[in-house]
Amino acid sequence: MGRAMIISIGEVVWDIFPERRVLGGAPVNVAYHLRCLDVEVGVVTRVGPDELGDRTIGTMTAMGLPVAGVQHGDLPTGTVKVTMDVNNEPHFDIVKPAAWDNIVLAEAAEFIGARPFKLVFGSLAQRDERSRRTIRGLWQKAEQRFYDVNLRPPDTSREIVEASLAVADLVKVNGAELLEVGRWHNLSGNERKSVAQELMGRYNIAVLVVTEGAEGAWLLDGDDYFQAPASPVKVADTVGAGDAFFATLLAGYENGLGWQKCLDRATERGGYVASQHGATPAMPDF
């Protein structure tokens, strides 16, 4: 059957900045960076019958991404209005409904076929019951499940996050999100490692990786702890930096690198993306 492909499923959106429109959405960003690292990847999402839908296909193709898994529906192609605060942190107004709210399981299954696959997914694309049903249908068939918590309230409910944590083999979360999920279970305080260990036990998570922005990132694999500092960069905007980090970590894992090497590479590439405008810049070889 061959080596398992990584399927990145979920929202495809156009990030609308005051001065430009940029194709984005975490699944597309992750897929792009996996492809840059020579990992075979498929993208499952949905676009609308509009100019942005056509532009999505053209842009993904120009990025070197496969489009056979992109579905076509009646709802409009997704958009997100992005504003930056004084610290260059993005804030998102996610327009609904969008085409990616109705990703169809039968079409996704037909695209994947009998090929073994591993699934990358997040929380946002599960906001609508239709796409949520599709993502959860693919959970059952995937060899492994890689979950990026990526809270976007009010679209990412506790139920969605907890159900996802319960099936994930590897989870990515940022430090603030880790503490938020911990508070749901009355895990108080700021000792993030102990909160992480409690959550890993509660949800039977094998590997948990936590990003800490300028402080770098750390990872727990059972009782084994790994940490990497952030690369010193001048931040342009942080949109997509976490997606580049996640993709690089997964690529290292797929290639059999140790976790320390995976973390070091992931923080370096995530930092580089933060130093650029947009989530999918041309990536140098490093």
Image: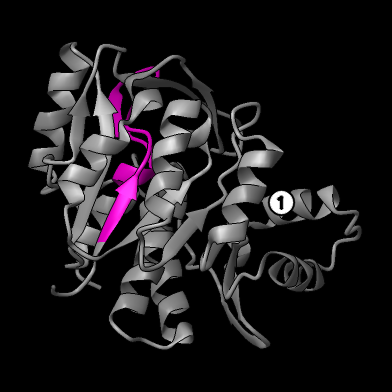
110 relative position to 178: left or right: left
Q: How many marks?
A: 1
How crowded pointer 1 is (Cα within 10 Å; few <14, some 14-19, many 20+) is rated as: some
- 100 above or below 208? above
Query: What is the quadrant of residue 219 in the picture?
Result: bottom right
Label 1 sits on residue: 176
Of 200 and 36, nearer the camera is 200
Residue 129 x/y as whole percent: 50, 27
- Residue at x-position 20% and y-position 66%: 39
Residue 241: tell me if it is visible: no
Of 192 and 282, nearer the camera is 192
Query: What is the quadrant of residue 78 in the picture?
Result: top left
Q: Where's the C terminus, which quadrant?
A: bottom left
Residue 21 painted magenta: yes
Query: What is the quadrant of residue 62 in the picture?
Result: top left
- Residue at x-position 67% and y-position 49%: 162
Q: Where's the N terminus, which quadrant?
A: bottom left
Residue 254 x/y as whole percent: 31, 76
* SS category of the residue bearing label 1: helix
- Residue at x-position 19% and y-position 70%: 285
- 280 above or below 130? below
Residue type, label 1: Ala
199 relative position to 144: left or right: right
Residue 133 x/y as whole percent: 45, 36
Span highlighted in magenta in the image: 6-29
Residue 252 x/y as whole percent: 34, 77
Residue 5: tell me if it is visible: yes
